[in-house]
Amino acid sequence: MHPDVLRGIKANLPFGLSAGAYGSVLGILAAQKGLGWFDIAFMNTAVFAGSAQFVMVDMWGPHLHILEMTLAVLIINLRYLLIGASLAPMFEQTRIGQKIFMMHLVADENWAATMVECHKHPNTSTWFLFGGGICIYACWSAGTLAGVLGGAAIAHPERYALDFAFCAVFTALAVSLWRGKQDVCPWLVAGILAFISEALLPGKWYIVIGGVGGAITAMFTPGTTENQETTTPEECSHVSTE
């Protein structure tokens, strides 16, 4: 095993424990929607994106609106375009198969840890990123599976306020993403569009419409792109990952 894999696992363990904790909430919500351990395990492997999985579970019902669900997940995961671009120099000397395999395990946590590690140790390879991905995936999967198995035994989740868990998790995520006054306009537009769409349209189209409207507004709002950190690990781009 490449030594950077173990370093990546150790560096991401605190993040992994946190991911497992709120992953258990997803598992409980999934159990209340009738999803079993195999369903959530497949979702963890095929999607592996916490916020997107919360949306999928929230939209789950007797009649699945596949198009709405797909568009909602796509919008939520658009940030991975920027994450992938920031990692491009690190993958210059890798084969396409290795890129696909490793990038599937990229999450916000191990990406951030890799950016920090590259500044500290220029010889860091993509195996550090991969090790972090293994750690996050294992902890996230353990948390969601524990939640599914435990949640199935809870007959009335509203007694424990578990029916509010989805709103609570996304409120916490939103607060952590707030960057200041430059976000006021995009967030306000997204909220208004979502509110109007929820009142006028059936299903979960308000998620898609609010997300797209907010993203477009951010594109034309001064200061929303200039102030974003787009750290690129160029100092790691020369490292061989073979």
Image (tube, rainbow, N blue to C red):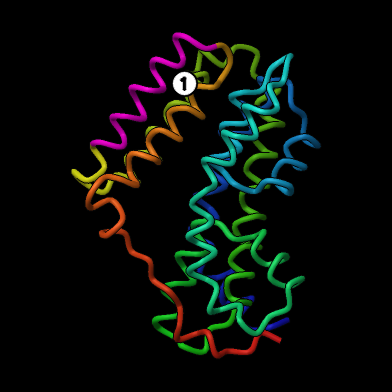
81 lies above or below 69: below
Percent x, y for residue 98?
73, 73
Q: Is residue 209 above or below residue 119?
A: above
Q: Name the residue under label 1.
A: 164
- Report the amino acid beneath label 1: Phe
Does the segment drawn in magenta span residue 194?
Answer: yes
The x and y percentages for residue 24 are 59, 37
The reply to whether residue 24 is visible in this rendering is: no
Q: Residue furthest left?
A: 181
Question: Which one is in front, 38 or 65?
Answer: 65
Q: Position of residue 106 (x, y in %)?
A: 59, 60
Q: Where on the picture, by quarter, is residue 202?
A: top right
- Image quadrant for the N terminus? bottom right
In magenta stretch: residue 198:
yes
The one of 204 and 139 positioned closer to us in this rendering = 204
Which sits in the foreground, 127 or 187?
187
Q: Tell me where residue 27 sits by quadrant.
A: top right
With respect to residue 212, does 104 lie above or below? below
Could you tell me which quadrant the C terminus lies in? bottom right
Which residue range is magenta in the image? Answer: 185-201
